[in-house]
Amino acid sequence: MSMRIPSMFKTPRHRTFDHKPIIYDERKERKLKLEQLVEDQKNGKLSDEARRARLDNIFGKRWSVSKTDRKQQSVNQQLRLLVIMGILVGLVWFFFNWA
């Protein structure tokens, strides 16, 4: 054994860091939820309304976009295209008339 010199101050001991990393896989979680949904559907435990609500939660609201929302998006895209085409035609006309 080694001899230590007595001290008035307590010296800090070696500290260890015990960290267990948590890995979250969103795709795996979504797949497990979907498999559970299919299993419940096969067993007859799930009604159509509950199934639709759970599918909306799993995939998000983007899958359940109504027909009117799609039509509005289409109109917005067409309007945006017309505005861009108008600007481009105006720029081409300006450069050919300026030169």
Image: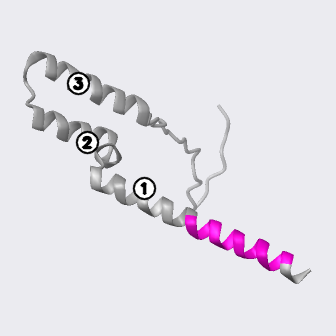
Which is in the foreground here, disc 1 or disc 3? Answer: 1
Residue 15: where, in percent of width, then height?
55, 45
Left or right, 3 with reference to 35: right
Q: Which mark is residue 36?
A: 3
Query: Residue at the location (15% across, 22% down)?
Result: 41
**Nearer mark to the viewer, of 2 and 3:** 2
- Which of the numbered marks, if any, corresponds to residue 35? none
63 vs 70, nearest the viewer: 70
Q: Quick check: 69 left or right of 39?
A: right
Q: Is residue 84 left or right of residue 28?
A: right
Q: Amino acid at mark 2?
A: Asp
Main SS, magenta region, reads helix
Kindly state the secondary structure of the residue where label 3 is placed: helix
Question: Which amino acid type is marked by label 1?
Answer: Ser
Q: Nearer the viewer, residue 53 or 91?
A: 91
- The amino acid type found where label 3 is placed reads Gln
